[in-house]
Image (cartoon, helix red, strand yellow):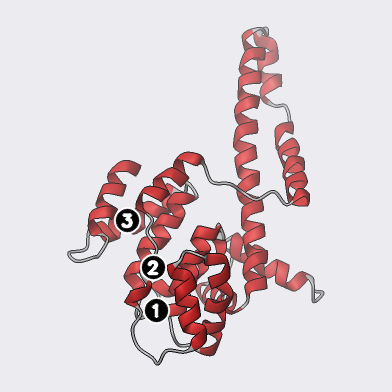
Amino acid sequence: MSEQSEPLQRIEAYVDRQMTPEEKAAFEQEMTLNPALRQQTRQVQESILTLRALAREAEKDSLRTMYQEVSATPRARVLDMALRPRTWLYAAAAAVLVLIVARISFSPRPDAVELYGRYFEPYPAERFRGGNDTSYRAAALQLYSEKNYAAAIPLLRGWSQKEPENETPLLYLAVSDMERGEHTEAIVLLTHLMAGKEFQEPARWYLALQYVKLGQSEKALPLLEEISGRTVHYRRAEATKLLKTLK
């Protein structure tokens, strides 16, 4: 195995859910510290999402065309038509390659983005607790508070590198990634924080919202149900209302 192919195979194994729980945890930990790896993983995931979306649309078109043909075709030819190769899949794959080359990013459905926007609020910077303030931390929090996420992200990453045991910059970084459209980075960080010690509940809420934004309600629902079922959670009311909307 070449040095270049090994990282790609690991990414594919992660995206295809072929890793063991231990391998998955180690890979996600590595992504929290490696922006390039997060970016590569995001590109692979978005390519797959694009392929699936195109395949679904192409299949709908194929089914409509086949129905029209069947309606005007003698019974003797119907079985032969049903056994034809599904050439739409190859067309969809070719279209995906064009999108990848052109670097066209996956865009969530407008209705999903609108629903996300109703419930999303940045995690307040003033909730920061502990530690002695430093210039890079103060600057990161100031930019984050101003919603200047593009400028805040490099400083938040620097903060995290200087204080690897501190989960606070990771939460702010995840929220910034959500608003910047860096979906994979946000999901990786929030999943990591859900297994942490300090920000499990906010991470669960924001991860649910991230899945809502992507139109992946099947992933958002279990998280929202868990939040709604808790006696105390700072987003319990919102989670319960969002659940009713999605169901």
- The residues bearing labels 1 and 2 have C-alpha atoms spaced at a distance of 10 Å
**First in sequence: mark 2 or mark 3?**
2
Q: Residues within 10 Å of mark 1 (few under 14, many from 20)?
A: few
**Would you place residue 246 above or below residue 33 in this image?**
above
In the displayed structure, 216 sits above or below 140; it is above
The amino acid at mark 1 is: Gly
Q: Residue furthest right?
A: 2
> Tag 2: residue type?
Ala
Residue denoted by label 2: 203
Q: Secondary structure at mark 1?
A: loop
In the shown orientation, is residue 202 left or right of residue 19? left
- Type of the residue with mark 3: Leu
Where does the N terminus fall, quadrant-wise?
A: bottom right
Instruction: Give whichever of 192, 13 is nearer the camera.
Output: 192
Residue at 25% x, 51% y is 240
**Percent coordinates x, y for residue 76 in the rendering:** 68, 11
What kind of element bears circle 3?
Answer: helix
Residue 26 appears in view = no
Report crowding for label 3: few under 14, some 14 to 19, many 20 or more residues within 10 A (C-alpha): many
Identity of the residue drawn at 38% across and 73% down: 125
Residue behind mark 1: 196
- Mark 1 near mark 2, Cβ–Cβ under 8 Å? yes
Foreground mark, 2 or 3, reads 2
Give the quarter of the image for residue 180.
bottom right
Q: Is residue 102 above or below residue 177?
A: above
> Which dot marks residue 224?
3
Answer with left or right where residue 135 lies relative to residue 129.
right
Circle on res. 138:
none
Residue 198 coordinates in the image, percent (x, y): 34, 79
Tag nearer the camera, 1 or 2: 2
